Image (tube, rainbow, N blue to C red):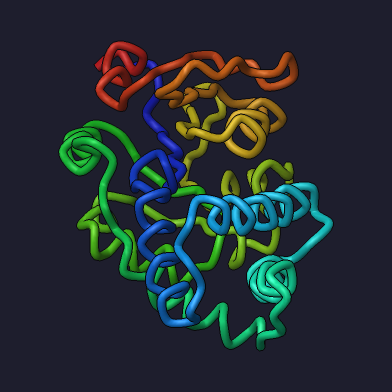
Amino acid sequence: MRYDTLLFDVDDTLLDFKAAENQALQALFGEMDVAFSKANVQAYEAINQAHWQEYEKGNLTTAEVVNGRFGLFFSSLGRQVDSLATEKKYRSYLDQGHKRLGNSLEIVQNLATKANLYVVTNGVAATQYKRLTAAGLLPYFKDVFISEVVGFQKPQAEFFEYVFAKIPDFKKERTVIIGDSLSSDIKGGINAGIATIWLNSDTRTPAIDSLPNYHIQQLEELYPILAI
């Protein structure tokens, strides 16, 4: 086997985050009397994505990202809301979103009998644990590393240094990260000196500083890469 330590991202790698987000936004907008329209969703996503990009750069904390975004969004609609309270409402809906991507459960179950699997994810710890548990994925991972707990986030080198220090008998040359994000998963893996597998189901082109070792469109394509 080429790699026996597999670091898995969660959102849009194992779980369908877009489905969870849409479900949560639709419920929140309904409760807050806001139209669940394409324009409103795009306006929220622009604010949210900008915040998470700053988070990846180390310019914002998790709390600053999630507790400030809805205040800004509703302000753009001409409304003033309690941003923290609105985030808590949204979080309660998001926690329920655990739709798996493809046959990720079967693949993880199979790989767990042949390799050591770990979760490496940015985000809110309570939410990620709830979603992984509800999806039936959690038991197959040796450990879960979430940026909120680690204190650093992908792609920061300190995040990966923390992870590597916690993995027994860790060997860089036997380790690979699997994820959908070029900016956090692939760039982080490159900076940390490990192999990278980019899960990209569309036709995006990676930036020159984020070129993955491998490019797959679905998780089934992991098997020949891992040489199982």
Please give the name of the residue rendered at 69% of the width and 80% of the height, measured from the top-left corner.
Answer: 79
Image position of 7 (left or right of 19): right
Residue 8 position within the rendered picture, expressed as x and y whole percent measured from the top left: 43, 40
* In the depicted structure, whether residue 27 falls above or below residue 155: below
Please give the name of the residue rendered at 38% of the width and 16% of the height, measured from the top-left corner.
Answer: 2
Please give the name of the residue rendered at 45% of the width and 24% of the height, measured from the top-left corner.
Answer: 200
Residue 56 position within the rendered picture, expressed as x and y whole percent measured from the top left: 72, 48
* In the depicted structure, whether residue 146 falls above or below residue 76: above
Q: Quadrant of the N terminus?
A: top left
Residue 24, picture quadrant: bottom left
Q: Quadrant of the C terminus?
A: top left
Residue 32 position within the rendered picture, expressed as x and y whole percent measured from the top left: 49, 81
Which one is nearer the viewer's eye here, 5 or 85? 85
Which residue of the protein is positioned furthest toward the right in this rendering? Answer: 59
Which one is nearer the viewer's eye here, 158 or 213? 213
Image position of 148 (left or right of 91): right
Residue 193, picture quadrant: top right
Residue 158 position within the rendered picture, expressed as x and y whole percent measured from the top left: 73, 49
Which one is nearer the viewer's eye here, 54 or 27? 27
Please give the name of the residue rendered at 32% of the width and 21% of the height, measured from the top-left corner.
Answer: 222
Which one is nearer the viewer's eye here, 146 or 165? 146
